[in-house]
Image (cartoon, helix red, strand yellow):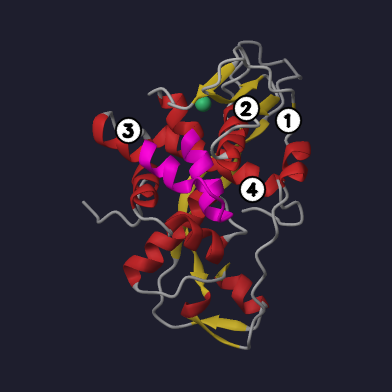
Amino acid sequence: MPERQHATWGELLRDAVEKPGRMLAAYTAFHNYSFGNALLALEQCVRRNLQPGPLNTYRGWLERKRQVRKGETGITLCMPIPFKRTTPMDDAEDESAEPRICNAFRFRAYWFVLAQTEGEDTDVAPIPGFDLDTALRALSITRTAFDEINGNVQGFARHREIAVSPLAALPHKTTFHEIAHVVLGHTTSEKLVDSEHTPRHLREVEAESVALICCETLELDGAEFCRGYIQHWLKTEIEIPNHNAAHIFAAATSILKAGTPATGSH
Ligand SMILES: [Zn+2]
């Protein structure tokens, strides 16, 4: 069996939960990539002793007048590969059965970090500022009045509305947790109410993981609280499945991108 070239989403999430600073380092170096890819690139840089920094393809570096050094092997990222899907129809004459363009996600080693290249100096893109209200608008999420009477309730999410208690212990953390419930699709059919003690449910691990990524990346209070909850979960419950880890990374990426509208995504 060939040696696996990259970690799974579940391994990357566990690693980032166990090592404070990992997510911030990934975002700092690779903020214009999705969160899963940023952690994937960072993990390979650390393992291969490469300075994390701007990524580009072989051709992309040539366009920036830099050459990938001889013998360097690519960094693997997960990329969408479009393909045409035709729905098999019994009636071959049906003209409406147009092929649809779908994306298959595949791992490809097409990228190189700056440290693997040489040539002319290159500009490093600054980390964009994040604005919460911009993010809420872009995600079509509105704030609603906090109308819970129970004093333990920190916040809630319902359809595309969120509310955070004016007395919340960690308002940023709770805000990102409630936004995450909406973005993760947890609130389409029910209202989720979060009290001081987050119940042990995979849905809550997902929302809390997104809150951890947002708080750590934006250097806001609350990351340690999220980390504690998720570590406890990892010790006492099942692993966070790959599928859920991918979902967490995608949600965190869309929240961060929504608040930094000038950036492109990969
Ligand atoms: Zn919750």
Residue 202 visible? The answer is yes
- Residue 133 image point, x, y percent: 76, 42
Identify residue type, mark 4.
Answer: Leu
Residue occupying the point 47% across, 78% down: 116
The residue range painted magenta reads 208-229
Identify residue type, mark 1.
Answer: Ile
**Can you identify the residue that label 4 sits on?**
256
**Can you identify the residue that label 2 sits on?**
182
The reply to whether callout 1 and callout 3 are in contact (CB within 8 Å) is no
The CA distance from mark 4 to mark 2 is 14 Å
Identify which residue, 254 or 164, lies in the foreground.
164
Q: Of label 4 and label 1, which has the lower sequence position?
A: 1
**Can you identify the residue that label 3 sits on?**
233
The CA distance from mark 1 to mark 3 is 28 Å
Q: Which mark is residue 141?
A: 1
The reply to whether callout 3 and callout 2 are in contact (CB within 8 Å) is no
Label 2 crowd (10 A; few <14 / some 14-19 / many >=20): many
Residue 92 vertical position relative to residue 130 in the rendered view, above or below: above
